[in-house]
Image (cartoon, rainbow, N blue to C red):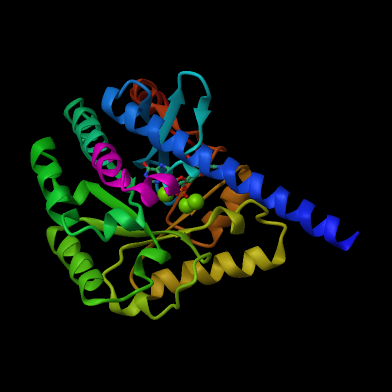
Amino acid sequence: AAKDKGRNTYLFYNSEMNETLVNKLNIENDLRKALASQEQLQLFYQPQLDLHTGKIVGYEALIRWFHPERGYIPPLDFIQVAEDCGLIIPLGEWVLREACLQLKKWQDLGFSDIRVSVNIATKHFQHPSFVSDVLNTLKEAELSAKYLELEITENSLLDSTQSTIETLTKINDLGIRIAIDDFGTGYSSLSYLKNFPISTLKIDQTFVYELPTNTGDRAIVSSIVNLAHNLGMRVVAEGVENNDALKYLQQEKCDEMQGYFFSRPLPADKVLEFMEKHTLNI
Ligand code: C2E
Ligand code: MG
Ligand code: MG
Ligand code: MG
């Protein structure tokens, strides 16, 4: 019986592995096509609200892939594949360019003081041409660097090699903001916070969903807000889904928030309408 069980286990894992591999290859091929045609990829934008003033201060760009046969494929299902096969470089460049050009259009229409936050994958951040790509994109879009924020994760800072420090310093010297996304969930130590030029901490949604009832989350969130402020950084809460959470964050002096309660990510053509109509009384 043990032998049978062993063999079944083997077959089971084997076919699972094949499925994953096939799936990965499909995603890779299909993503390559999507990038070439540019018809399936789109950026959505989620507004970020200033909790002190009630004003929209920026938008986070989030990639959307609408596959002709498979329908919507969430970013978490293909970003890692794109990193593994190298497609993250053209993909990341496309996102950066698209987001900067779009923001410039909104600014030209009168929303002159809003910024855009762009998620940067670790492999892209660590690529030798990253800083010059960012700079070229800003030039092409005729966008001032202070309106761009790059969201990186703690994992991008795991190896504090000379090149990581150089990249961060160059970005900061250009006047571009750097935010740590999903703060509190990575494997990195806190020491990078005092060594690196970081402007923003984004509190991970897992600490925000159950506010204000969850005691542990309350302690964590209020500590992150204090930590950020004591280090001279801004702090943003993501995943705000209800008014009680918003009120709690406001009371704790969290600077900004984003979440379904205020708005889901919107297609670009819905953003102007949203900005014109929306002011939240807080
Ligand atoms: P993230 O950067 O932490 O983005 C926040 C995610 O939470 C987004 O999911 C957003 O749609 C979702 N979200 C926002 N508010 C709420 C809320 O109130 N409740 C809930 N349940 N969810 C909320 P999305 O768009 O599926 O993206 C997932 C992740 O994929 C992102 O996490 C980011 O790590 C990655 N990603 C998305 N777009 C890009 C991109 O253009 N480039 C790269 N490298 N990564 C991206
Ligand atoms: Mg993000
Ligand atoms: Mg996040
Ligand atoms: Mg996340």
Q: Residue at x 40, y 70 (%)?
A: 229
Residue 71 or residue 166, whichever sits in front: 71
User: Magenta residues: mostly which secondary structure?
Assistant: helix
Residue 48 or residue 87, whichever sits in front: 87
**Quadrant (top left/top right/bottom left/bottom right) for the N terminus:** bottom right
Q: Residue at x 78, y 51 (%)?
A: 8
Quadrant of residue 95 in the image?
Answer: top left
In the image, residue 137 above or below residue 106: below
- Left or right: 83 as drawn, with respect to 130: right
Residue 89 visible in the shown view: yes
Q: Residue at x 30, y 40 (%)?
A: 91
Residue 45 visible in the shown view: no
- Left or right: 181 as drawn, with respect to 249: left
- Left or right: 214 as drawn, with respect to 89: right
x and y percentages locating residue 143 in the rendered image = 14, 41
* Magenta region, residue range: 80-95
The magenta stretch spans residue 88: yes
Residue 67 or residue 132, whichever sits in front: 67
In the image, residue 54 above or below residue 7: above
Q: Residue furthest front?
A: 3
x and y percentages locating residue 73 in the rendered image = 50, 32
The magenta stretch spans residue 177: no
x and y percentages locating residue 237 in the rendered image = 49, 54
